[in-house]
């Protein structure tokens, strides 16, 4: 077996894919978790999945459909939630279920074998292409730049959305920029990590970091570290014990969350209040 | 900021009515405020004070009339104009787990003014730290905002509005849950800052015994209408207040700082 730095060559692409998805998903996750938009994240992930199925049906590249559908979902859910006539959960739920319906429809319409469609569920981090890695690294760089340049605006919008409006931050612009980037990140990661894995990569690292700190910068850094740890740890476990990669990645990220929740200082605060 | 023209700094409210589900919260109000004016707005609960301030900062729609703040109508406010209106809201809900400290929260007040995509400068942080000290919350600076008491949170909001150094300052019962001594300190501070920046200040309060000496105008609202508008020494007296708030006049049995300083 050909090895580079003691690691089999075929593992290098998954390692990079894990690195980039780990970073991108956990940064997006910080946005989602701090603003309580978990359900919205799941809804967008679902839409990306539906879009990929749509592409398979009409013979496009799945990435194209994923991007299209996740952007459509963000464009519908964002303003609906903003206008406040329906509760955000309700409007997200409606879009979510519509997308689910469409997913089943496209799944039924795809001619021939459904194998490629089903592989979207679990993704195939072991067989990512060079192109996938480029795209993933692109979106990761974009996210890192976005959070570096607009750090203070993003911090304000995430923590004090209404106040951010009063003090003259273009809040809607920042919010939609984040929402669209979320859509893109999810669509791009779907190809590599799969529909089911995305939820855990989006939510677990950032939710764990959220448990552990009141510092926004620390939360971002921890979240990224947890994301990468989950991906790389999962890869290593699956390689060593011959387990399904998606499953090991998810389980490691969940384990991190459970540990964070147990050791969370915020949990103690809540306990005090409940007494 | 001091270079704004006189015209730019006025608030003009012409025949404005605002309805919530056909119930008028403001009923044909006409008011205008000069630059540098410190107006205290009084009125019983539900008289429309919050609605008035919300209209001025573009958070609430109105159905009739016209409003101009710094020459612009609220529906056309952009984020650049909002930087010139600092606002302390009556109710601010805060998620107790938010990853933001008191100091960072106060610094949000500089986040607009200092420019999009630019980190805060040393001078911004210095202003944040001095203001935090003036308001008396330095010992809380590194606490997460979700861990504050109600009054501490209000102090944080006031500090945030002050560091914004906006020409217009809208304060909606900013000291409602702050203890009397700290209230006095903060009012003194407001007056002090006022001289420095010539803010136009609209100050909503129920504390008639703590009306700042610097106040040069009282606007009394009742049932969404301007019920009285004039100098404090004309309006802050037992008779008027009894009439404004109704009831048995219990509130007016106390003394008013204004009454005292002017006699
Ligand atoms: N969101 C809303 N929906 C419906 N009615 C509202 C809403 N907000 C305020 N109102 C009504 O409008 C009127 C004016 O309310 P506003 O909040 O301006 O009063 P206020 O003078 O600030 O009172 P307070 O002293 O209690 O703060 C009240 O009758 C209130 O019930
Ligand atoms: Mg009010």
Image: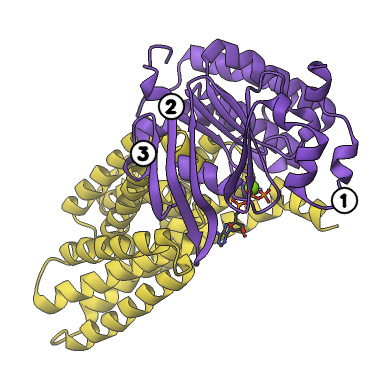
Chain colours: A yellow, B purple
Tell me, yes or no, if residue B143 can be seen here.
no
Q: Position of residue B33 (x, y in %)?
A: 49, 28
Q: Identify the residue position indicated by label 3 in the image.
A: A170
Q: Say which of A162 and A77 sits in front.
A: A162
Whether the residue under disc 3 has CB within 8 Å of ligand 1? no
Q: Residue at x 51, y 25 (%)?
A: B164
Q: Is residue B82 left or right of residue A136?
A: right
Q: Residue at x 43, y 27 (%)?
A: B10
Tell me, yes or no, if residue B88 can be seen here.
yes
Q: Which chain hosts label 3?
A: A
Local packing at callout 2 (Cα closer than 10 Å; few below 14, some 14-19, many 20+) is many
Dot 2: element: loop
Q: Identify the residue position indicated by label 1 in the image.
A: B248
Dot 3: element: loop
Mark before the other along the chain sequence, 2 or 1: 2
Q: In the image, which is nearer the foreground, mark 2 or mark 1? A: 1
Whether the residue under disc 1 has CB within 8 Å of ligand 1? no
């Amino acid at each position: 077996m050909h090895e580079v730095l003691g690691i089999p060559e075929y593992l290098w692409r998954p390692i990079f894919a894990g690195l980039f998805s780990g970073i991108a998903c956990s940064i997006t996750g910080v946005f989602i978790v701090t603003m309580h938009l978990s359900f919205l994240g799941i809804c967008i992930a679902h839409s990306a999945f539906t879009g990929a199925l749509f592409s398979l049906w009409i013979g496009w590249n799945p990435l194209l459909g994923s991007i299209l559908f996740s952007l459509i979902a963000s464009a519908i859910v964002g303003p609906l939630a903003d206008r406040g006539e329906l509760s955000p959960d309700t409007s997200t739920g409606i879009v979510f279920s519509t997308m689910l319906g469409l997913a089943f429809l496209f799944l039924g319409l795809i001619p021939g074998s459904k194998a490629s469609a089903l592989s979207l569920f679990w993704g195939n981090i072991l067989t990512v292409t060079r192109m996938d890695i480029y795209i993933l690294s692109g979106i990761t760089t974009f996210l890192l730049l976005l959070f570096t340049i607009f750090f203070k605006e993003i911090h304000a919008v995430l923590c004090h959305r209404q106040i951010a409006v009063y003090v003259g931050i273009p809040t809607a612009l920042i919010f939609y920029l984040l929402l669209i980037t979320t859509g893109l990140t999810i669509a791009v990661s779907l190809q590599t990590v799969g529909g089911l894995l995305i939820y855990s990569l989006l939510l677990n690292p950032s939710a764990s970091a959220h448990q552990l700190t009141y510092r926004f910068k620390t939360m971002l850094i921890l979240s990224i570290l947890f994301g990468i740890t989950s991906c790389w740890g999962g890869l290593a476990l699956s390689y060593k014990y011959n387990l399904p990669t998606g499953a090991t990645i998810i389980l490691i990220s969940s384990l991190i969350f459970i540990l964070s929740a147990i050791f969370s200082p915020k949990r103690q605060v809540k306990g005090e209040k409940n007494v | 900021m001091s270079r704004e023209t006189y015209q730019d700094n006025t608030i003009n409210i012409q025949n404005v009515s605002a309805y919530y589900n056909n119930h008028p919260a403001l009923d044909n109000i006409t008011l205008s405020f000069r630059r540098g004016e410190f107006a205290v707005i009084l009125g019983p609960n539900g008289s429309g004070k919050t609605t008035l301030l919300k209209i001025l900062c573009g958070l609430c729609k109105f159905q009739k009339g016209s409003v101009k703040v710094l020459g612009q109508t609220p529906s056309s406010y952009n984020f650049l104009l909002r930087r010139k209106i600092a606002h302390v809201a009556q109710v601010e809900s805060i998620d107790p787990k938010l990853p933001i400290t008191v100091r960072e929260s106060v610094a949000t007040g500089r986040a607009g003014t200092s420019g999009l995509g630019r980190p805060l400068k040393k001078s911004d942080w210095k202003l944040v730290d001095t203001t935090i000290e003036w308001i008396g919350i330095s010992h809380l600076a590194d606490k997460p905002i979700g861990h504050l008491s109600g009054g501490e949170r209000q102090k944080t909001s006031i500090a945030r509005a002050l560091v914004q150094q906006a020409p217009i300052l809208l304060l909606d019962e900013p000291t409602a849950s702050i203890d009397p001594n700290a209230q006095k300190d903060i009012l003194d501070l407001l007056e002090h800052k006022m001289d420095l920046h010539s803010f136009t200040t609209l100050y909503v309060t129920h504390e008639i015994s703590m009306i700042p000496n610097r106040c040069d105008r009282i606007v009394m609202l009742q049932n969404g209408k301007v019920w009285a508008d004039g100098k404090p020494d004309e309006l802050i007296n037992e008779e008027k207040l009894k009439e404004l708030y109704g009831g048995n006049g219990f509130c007016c049995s106390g003394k008013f700082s204004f009454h005292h300083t002017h006699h």
